[in-house]
Image (spheres, helix red, strand yellow):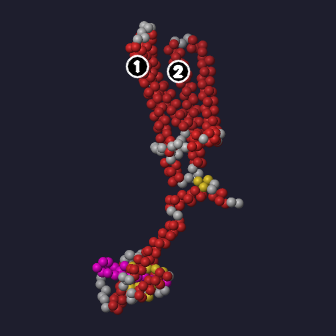
Amino acid sequence: MNLQLFAQEKTERATPRKRQKARERGQVFSSRELSSALGLLIGLVLIRICGSFLLENIASYLEDVIGQNFLKKDFSFDALYDVLYSSTVLLIKTILPIGMGMVLTGIVTNLAQVGFVFSLEPLSPKIERINPVEGFKRIFSQKGLVEFAKSVIKLTLIIYLFFGAFNELKNTAPLILDMSLGESIGYFLNLIFKAGLKTSAALLILSVFDYVYQWYEYEKSLMMSKEDIKEEFKEVEGNPQIKSRIRQAQRQILRRRMMLDVKKADVVITNPTHIAVALGYDATVNDAPVVLAKGAGLIAEKIKEVAEEEAIPIVENKPLAQTLYKSVEVGEAIPEELYNAVAEILAYVYSLKGKRVSG
């Protein structure tokens, strides 16, 4: 059994970095059905709110065009220009508020789903887009079949709801004969509005399922294999072997620097064989003795070798050596509770050198 195949199976959820890179490429998920359903709903509501205003403008336009031009048989250039101008004004008055409302709804819906994303990568030319074989694969893929099924369901819903509306019209047809022209037009418009409202509500419910499906497909497309996660970790954190070599080189540099500092020490306190701590004290620079170097095992042996070469006194004090090694880092001054113990050792060392302990 090839275990490498299991490592390449995309079974892991996408990492934050993978999601961020996908977003930068413009690869985000959103439901176009949700935008369309909300746009239709808002458009119908705006038509309902502005209905009387729209009808008044249309009636005024028809009265002007028919009364002033066609009935008078005035087809001069100025008259035709007036007709074109009034038609443009009517179009702006009737279409612009509703159209702008639907456009703004689409923008807000998309921003709510994916936020602000700017990427030119989706516009870049790709050979698979013009490849007929790839085109057929997309059409007959699972996603293509789902999109086809959604279109069939939407069309079925629209036909069913509008058929129900006109079925109601069949039952109320005798009543329409007794209505005035204005009342019958109002009745038809109200009937169409109710059918449209039911349709938009049904499409809105359908869009919720589409949103969940789009989210599922998006998460599935971002899935990663264990090998992908390892490679991403190496890319972000660096190759572990290289990092290990860098840390080893850094430790070697620090050790060399520490061994040079041992030469400045006044005394080396030992365990006696396992631990060595080099202390230095300069009253003009520090208020207390400072640990210049410390180490265990081979490093401790190296510290003692340097001390012997530089004729630096080596004092055996097991409790003090262990305490200094565990509690004080290289470059730090000793804590106050160790002042007396260290001062006694420095006094002894300085007496050998003929120096005096100050402070």
Give 73 or 93, whichever is nearer the viewer.
Answer: 73
**Which of the two labelled residues, at mark 2 and mark 1, occupies the earlier sequence position?**
1
Q: Please, which residue is most extreme toward the left here?
A: 284
Q: Is residue 253 visible?
A: yes
Q: Residue at x 61, y 30 (%)?
A: 155
The quarter of the image holding the N terminus is: bottom right
Give the structural element (helix, strand or loop) at label 2.
helix
- Residue 293 is situated, as x and y percent measured from the top left of the image, at 41, 79
Residue range highlighted in magenta? 274-290
Give the structural element (helix, strand or loop) at label 1.
helix
Q: Residue at x 36, y 85 (%)?
A: 266
In front: label 2 or label 1: 1
Amino acid, disc 2: Leu
Amino acid, disc 1: Tyr
Q: Is residue 279 left or right of residue 40?
A: left
- Residue 182 is situated, as x and y percent measured from the top left of the image, at 50, 14
Q: Is residue 273 above or below residue 136?
A: below
Disc 2 marks which residue?
189
How crowded pointer 2 is (Cα within 10 Å; few <14, some 14-19, many 20+) is rated as: some
Query: What label sits on residue 230 in the rendered view?
Result: none
35 drawn magenta: no
Disc 1 marks which residue?
85
Q: Residue at x 43, y 75 (%)?
A: 254
